[in-house]
Image (tube, grey):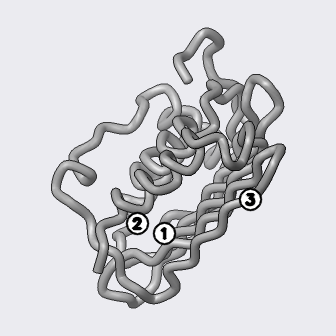
Amino acid sequence: MPPLADLHRAVQAALAGKRLGKPVFVRYLLHGPDKPEAVVRRLTQLAGVVRGWIGQPPERVYAVGSPADGQVSLALHFREGATALVSFARGRSPGPGADVMVFGNHGALYHDAGDASLWEEAEDLADRPDPQLEAAVQRSLRSGKPEPLPTGAPP
């Protein structure tokens, strides 16, 4: 059982190696046993990971679903036109399972952990998500509309 952080590092290494070119779209689907009160924080942490892969600050986020129901998706639009879909689905697996797709302008990367039950290192759980992004996700869930993010935010 590899840690989820290993997956994140592998994607980052592939992007740093320029094999994919410039990232233009990321889909990150995660399923796990998280409780409803942890879903938005989890998605915001994953959106931060995706933001690092894309290397651009997000301009807008649109959140749909319900943490109480265990299904939430974020659509992110980045400053230079890249987009991402980050989703969480609550499931019965003992740990998170991940499905990641990264499209660059020169290639693509796919990873499907399926039910591999990746585990998380303690420092991954302690990472504080971007408070501005987390607030925008919460606003979007309440409003049902895309929410802007402050300009000038770091990538």
Q: Which residue is mark 2?
A: 36
State which quadrant residue 34 falls in. bottom left
Instruction: Say what amino acid the circle numbered 2 marks.
Output: Pro
For residue 108, the mark is 3
Residue 115 percent coordinates (x, y): 45, 89
User: Residue at horizontal 36%, vertical 64%?
Assistant: 4
Q: Is residue 98 above or below residue 60?
A: below
Frontmost of labels 3 and 1 is: 3
Total numbered circles: 3
Instruction: Say what amino acid the circle numbered 1 marks.
Output: Ala
How many C-alpha atoms fall within 10 Å of the one at disc 2: few (<14), some, or many (≥20)?
some
Residue 118 percent coordinates (x, y): 34, 75
How many C-alpha atoms fall within 10 Å of the one at disc 3: few (<14), some, or many (≥20)?
some
User: Residue at horizontal 27%, vertical 51%?
Assistant: 124
- The answer to whether residue 145 is seen in the rendering is no
In the displayed orientation, state which residue is furthest to the top.
Answer: 152
Q: Which residue is mark 1?
A: 68
In this picture, residue 33 sits left or right of residue 67: left
Instruction: Say what amino acid the circle numbered 3 marks.
Output: Ala
